[in-house]
Image: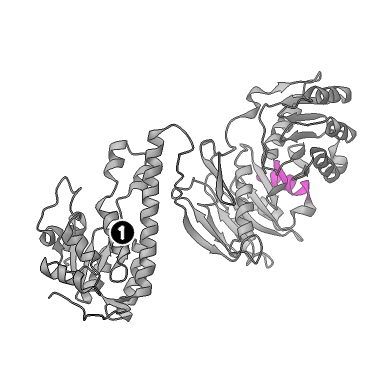
Amino acid sequence: MFWLPMRGFVSMERTIRRALLSVSDKTGLVDFARVLQEFGVELISTGGTRKTLADAGLKVLDISEVTGFPEILDGRVKTLHPRIHAGILARRDDPKHMATLKEHQIEPIDLVVCNLYPFEKTLEQRADHEELIENIDIGGPSMVRSSAKNYQDVAIVTSPDQYPAVIDELRQNKGALTLATRQRLAAAAFARTAAYDGAIARYFAGLESSDTFPETLHLGFHRRQALRYGENPHQRAAFYVEPAPPAASIATAEVLHGKELSYNNILDLDSALNLVREFTEPAAVVIKHNNPCGAAIGSTLEEAFQKAYEGDPLSAFGGILGFNRELDEATARQITEPNRFVECIIAPGYSEAAWQLLTTRPTWKKSVRLLKTGPLVNREQTNTLDYRRVDGGLLVQTRDAGGDDFAQIKTVTKRQPGDAEINSLRVAWIICKHVKSNAIVLVKDGMTVGVGAGQMSRVDSVHLATRKAGERTKGAVLASDAFFPFRDSIDEAARFGITAVVQPGGSVRDQEVINACNEHGIAMIFTGVRHFRH
């Protein structure tokens, strides 16, 4: 029976009498459709969706029975029809709209259930161009947008995740949905089509040009979780993830145990993970305020942790720990020694014994957050983009990742560094890349003994690092993330017994700095690569 509302009557609820279902992801579809039929909803469907419903014993109209026109062009054209879009877009409180529907014998559609062809998933699977093009949905986004535009009268469901809440409300309201729900569903629908079109636009931008930076930047990040607050309690915050986050990243890590992660926790965990993944040897890092206060390699994970923690025990209290191997019992015993407190741990995995130790100690069992990444891989995709917000805009750059800076190192001093010094310089250089500039890192026996971070002058960073290291500077090596503008840093390093230095080079005063090293008998190598981290 054709439905016509009373003139001037506007209801906050809309009873669902007719629904169109056309989905790619059929998760939960049959159960959802059964609930609709419990309330006498007439079901219309297309292609594979219709077959799924019919095979489940549900009564369903084929779309061609509504349009009077068959699906054509291998299914490319099926819902793009006035009988469909008029039924969706007609304003129920507009007598002219409803009269037009009656004149053309078009029934209103009150609910549209549509999730789109899986373009993003097909892209992740590295499908060929032709398959990607066939997975660009046209009719689906059109129906979604029509429904969302007319949310005053029509509900649009774009994800199986929305089924439970919709079912609950239908049952509560005897087959009707409220305006607030329809509006919320519309907002989600427009967000979905925006992300979908953004993914397609990014793909075509890549075809159009080899330029890493497209003319228009389309971002499609999805909110993973709301956070208690941001860097400070008065700031609000949330964590968003990209559509296909890289494997073994903070976005894909599984939170196994502990309190909710904070904004600062996520920043520090990301820093810890990106540092330890650069080492092939067992490695451990302690992060405080987004800087490594201790980092080390060892023959075992236990040794690496001991050395990393001893790099700066005072700063390590309340730190974030990162490991590049499954965390074992011996390492867990070291971590849980009395008077040691950490906020979070991130590792590829945890042995059963380590898990028991970390989750059953009275002072640890409720608070410490444990995250599992799975096997680590080095992020060598240098074309991956980093984003940083500024007022009114966005700075975009490629990641400072991948490559072997030591492949073309050049010794610029009279004294050549020995093999042991080269190994220590390499460790210091890797760690230095992850320290806020101006960055100075002192390493001895595969561990940091002093770190100077975030200072306005390089010599001040040297002062901080040597003060932290104390007597341990004797025989240590030094890494600097950028060139030395003056020789003062070398003179200071020599005073504390530094034997070798690695830096990018490139200053107009390079020769002055080289001469200072020669005077002090310090070996120095240039990498030719700078690693500022502002």
Q: Which residue is mark 1?
A: 145
Q: What stretch of residues is rendered in magenta? A: 293-312
Q: Residue, x 60% and y 45% (percent of image)?
A: 325
Numbered disc 1: secondary structure: helix
Lateral position of residue 495 relative to residue 19, left or right: right
Image-quadrant location for residue 508: top right
- The residue that appears at 72% across and 60% down in the rendered structure is 341
Relative image position of residue 212 (x, y in whole percent): 48, 35
Residue 473 drawn in magenta: no
Q: Magenta span has 307?
A: yes
Above or below 26: residue 206: above
Rendering coords of residue 80 (x, y %): 20, 54
Left or right? Give the position of 188 relative to 399: left
**Residue 304 falls left or right of residue 132:** right
Closer to us: 463 or 187: 187
- In the depicted structure, whether residue 105 falls above or below residue 77: below
Measuring from the top left, give residue 264's x and y in whole percent. 64, 57
Q: Residue at x 20, y 63 (%)?
A: 86
Label 1 Cα crowd, 10 Å radius (few <14 / some 14-19 / many 20+): some
Please state if 158 lies on the left or on the right of 51 as rendered.
Answer: right
Instruction: Please indicate, yes or no, whether residue 47 appears anywhere in the rendered image.
Output: yes
Residue depicted at 28% across the width and 37% down the height: 130
Q: Is residue 344 above or below residue 271?
A: below
Tell which residue pokes out farthest to the top in this image.
414
- Residue that protrudes farthest toward the right in the picture: 495
x and y percentages locating residue 198 in the rendered image: 40, 48
Q: Amino acid at mark 1?
A: Arg
- Is residue 352 visible in the rendered structure shown here? no
Q: Quadrant of residue 430?
A: top right
